[in-house]
Amino acid sequence: MPPGTTVKGIHAHGASYWSRTAEIQTLRNDGSPQSYYIKATQNRFGLKMFHGEYESSKAIYDVCPDFIPEPIAYGTFASIPNTHFYLSQFIDMADELPDIDTFPEKLAELHKKATSSQYGFHYQTMTALLPLYHIMAAEKLAQGPASEEQLRLESVFFERIIPRLIRPLETGGRQIQPRLVHSDLWDGNAAVNVEDGGSLEMGPRRVPRHRTGKPYIEMYHKFFPKSAPEEDHDGRNLLYSV
């Protein structure tokens, strides 16, 4: 926080499956109010989780600053070494669906601007509380050895389905352009700014409610056209969901 900041109070605010969340109310050095949003956890992967959230949020904010609360800091409490935190700008949000006229356009803007020459991300992000490779290992332990049918389907999936849907994207002079994407984009991770009515992406802070769907996708494609061949669009989306 800026020098001269005075903390007036901290109150539980919002919700998260993996951490405690709160609003920190402060006064700036000039006496004007300023609030911050904080998430904290004692999970052993907490610091890595919040580091990943900070880097991911910063990547989005740097490209589309009106699409996500500004990330400020992450770290470990000096007085509580097993407790980690993520701090961001506080925005009062309404529990409403994002505006179909603005949210898809902002998402398309992110995808247009945040391009890269290579795949991947410079920091390992998490799936909930665990790194992705831990999730995959836990899934294998929970499911047990693969059955003959699973192995057969796996072979078909990798040898036939993926090439069929992905290869056309890089034929006929076409090329795939890596872009920054949100790995968990659904209406539970979106909200409406109470102050100006703007649509925001705001991380896993709310209860589940899948109510955005095809109309939002269709509006998105008005700003970001479907890749050719367009007839494979639905199949590619199904592949992505797997």
Image (spheres, rainbow, N blue to C red):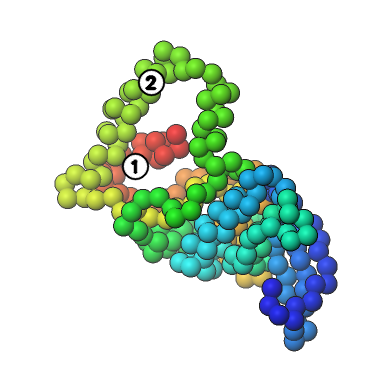
Q: Is residue 43 above or below residue 225?
A: above
Q: Is residue 105 above or below residue 125?
A: below
Disc 2 crowd, CA 10 A, few/some/many (<14, 14-19, 20+): few
Give, as a three-letter code, the residue at label 2: Leu
Mark yes or no: residue 70 visible. yes
Q: Is residue 37 left or right of residue 232?
A: right
- On the image, the x and y values in percent for residue 140 come to 52, 25
**SS for callout 2:** helix
Q: Residue at x 81, y 64 (%)?
A: 10
Disc 1 crowd, CA 10 A, few/some/many (<14, 14-19, 20+): some
Q: Quadrant of residue 219?
A: bottom left
Outermost residue on the bottom side: it is 30
**Precedes in sequence: disc 2 or disc 1:** 2
- On the image, the x and y values in percent for residue 175 come to 24, 51
Q: Quadrant of the C terminus?
A: top left
- On the image, the x and y values in percent for residue 198 come to 58, 66
- Which mark is in front, 2 or 1? 2
- Residue 153 - label: 2
Give, as a three-letter code, the residue at label 1: His
Q: Residue at x 28, y 27 (%)?
A: 160
Near-viewer residue (194 or 202): 202
Q: Please give the residue where the numbered disc 1 appears in the rendered image.
A: 233
